[in-house]
Amino acid sequence: MKQKITISHWEETCEDDSCFEYGTSISLNGKELIREASIKTAIETLVKELGIEAEIEEICEELKCITYKKNK
């Protein structure tokens, strides 16, 4: 069976406009698996749901990326 994977980018504003949030959710066959995830977490969740064993490695190729990951 062919699986349907949906990547949804979303934005939300608080009712009083005091905050703004955005993110990405991943759905498999219409079932939302994860919301507000890093790309690595999203992929881990997806492969787990599909029953696939995988080693996922995240690599930063630029200094900005490495600095960002250290500050998280």
Image (cartoon, helix red, strand yellow):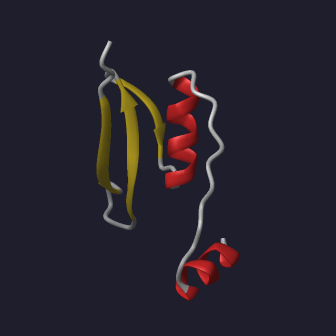
Up the image or down, 4 lies above or below 70; here it is above
Q: Residue 72 location in percent, x, y?
A: 66, 70
Q: Quadrant of residue 44?
A: top right
Could you tell me how many numbered marks the image carries?
0
Seen as rendered, the residue at the extreme top is 1
Please tell me which residue is depicted at 38% across the width and 50% down the height of the picture: 24
Is residue 25 or residue 59 the one in the foreground? Answer: 59
Point 66% across, 43% down: residue: 55
Q: Is residue 13 left or right of residue 41?
A: left
Q: Residue at x 30, y 18 (%)?
A: 2
Q: How far from the left and from the top, in percent, is residue 33?
A: 47, 31
Q: In the shown orientation, is residue 24 left or right of residue 40? A: left
Above or below, 42 relative to 46: below
Question: Residue furthest toward the right?
Answer: 70
Residue 18 versus residue 48 in the image, above or below: below
Residue 57 relative to residue 20: left or right: right
Picture layout, residue 2 above or below residue 61: above
Quarter that holds the N terminus? top left
Residue 51 position, x and y percent, is 57, 21
Which one is in front, 18 or 27?
27
